[in-house]
Amino acid sequence: MTRNVWVLMLAQAFAMCAAPLVVFAGGLIGKQLATDSSFATLPVAAMVIGTAVAVYPAASIASRYGRKLVFLGAMLIGLAGSLVAVFSIQMESFSGFVVAAVLIGVVLACIQQFRFAAMESVKSDFMPVAASRLLLAGIVAAYLGPELVTLGLGIHQQTFVGAFYLLGGCFIIAFLFLLFGYRNIELKIVKEEGEPRSFSEMLSNPGILLAMGSASVGYAVMSFIMTATPISMHELNNYSLEETKWVIQSHILAMFVPSLFSGWLVKKLGFIAMMWTGLAIYAICLLIAYWDQALVHYWGALVLLGLGWNLLFVSGTALLPQMHQANETHSVQGLNDLMVFSIQAVAALGSGALLILLGWQGVVLVSLPIMAILVLLLLNWRRVEKLKATS
């Protein structure tokens, strides 16, 4: 692995602490600050909305000025968002905390480019491995993000305030890694490639649709179930904060630990096999979640949810660069992340309201039609490949 990949892994390990922290604490803080409990998950949804809104502008700025400028600017925005969160919790301002979550979402949009920057830093054969290696940073973030709540109590007695002070420190550390370690990569454009295609032409390509669909469905189902979990466990089923944190930490670890081998599996067995496997794991996850709401069922379902997400996301991410021209890189990446995180934003936004209306089992059942979208895309891909083989 190149120097850039290692630097990006280190920076992501600290910067990505924001996501599990907001996932764990966002709904609980929202429950404390919001006047209507149905809006409790709005901060988590706001984080995802911030990501969805920022992904395409971030890709456009990177294409013009280089990824390093985007990465460094993002870390400063993250520091600002952390301080806004601190102020909002202290002032008991729900709207202020939602703004902080949006700013953190903007940072996550830029962090999503880390995986593309890593793949650009290696040869094409190693792209799946580079993408999965970047996700290994999530192992650190999975533990450290929620743990900032406990560590932060030594800084400030008010719950969650110290956590966001520490998150600001994580962004500063990531900034320093990127400032001194990351180098922009020049993309090689082949003259014979022709003009970049329009968005409609790109989306008519079954391969691009499948790559985007795999990542989008993976994120949508994962976000939908994960966002509802802390409130369902802690507020509705009266599990302790420690038990809830353990389930969320286990889930996020399960999202990233498989990166030790998922890139290799995609390389050896292929994208399609891994996508079907990811869907099968999701199906088992939903069965366990629907069966009962005992602690072991929450834990088992959330661990499988993380594993299924990893296979779907790594497969889609590694397939995408093979489906477009080099001169379309930033456009396709921006379009991909816009689709992925717009769908995730809708899932996160609806999760809390549907939990109140339909209950935990209702949330689980709503995930099934989302999974059906990827099934249709996979069947369409198989049909297109058969037509190519017979022509």
Image (spheres, rainbow, N blue to C red):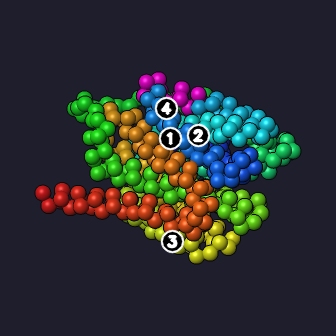
Measured along the vertical axis of the image, is residue 298 above or below residue 226? below
The answer to which of marks 2 and 4 sits earlier in the sequence is 4
- How far apart are the two marked residues, 3 and 2, measured between alpha carbons? 30 Å
Q: Mark 1 points at which residue?
A: 52
Q: Mark 4–mark 1 contact, CB under 8 Å?
A: no
- How far apart are the two marked residues, 3 and 4, measured between alpha carbons? 36 Å
Q: Which of 343 and 32 is in front in this view?
A: 32
Q: How many other residues sit within 10 Å of disc 3, few (<14), some (14-19) or many (≥20)?
A: some
Q: Name the residue under label 2.
A: 105
Q: Is residue 307 left or right of residue 264?
A: right
Q: Where is residue 31 in the image (x, y as percent from the top left)?
A: 72, 51
Q: Which residue is pictured at 46% across the width and 65% down the height?
A: 368
Q: Nearer the viewer, residue 141 or 342?
A: 342
Q: Mark 3–mark 1 contact, CB under 8 Å?
A: no
The answer to which of marks 2 and 1 sits earlier in the sequence is 1
Q: Name the residue under label 4.
A: 58
Query: Label 1's element?
Result: helix
Query: Label 4's element?
Result: helix
Q: Mark 3–mark 4 contact, CB under 8 Å?
A: no
Q: Nearer the viewer, residue 289 or 69?
A: 289
Would residue 274 be seen by someone viewing this image from the given angle? no
Query: Which stretch is magenta?
Result: 62-73
Q: Name the residue under label 3.
A: 284
Q: Which residue is pictured at 38% across the width and 51% down the height?
A: 211
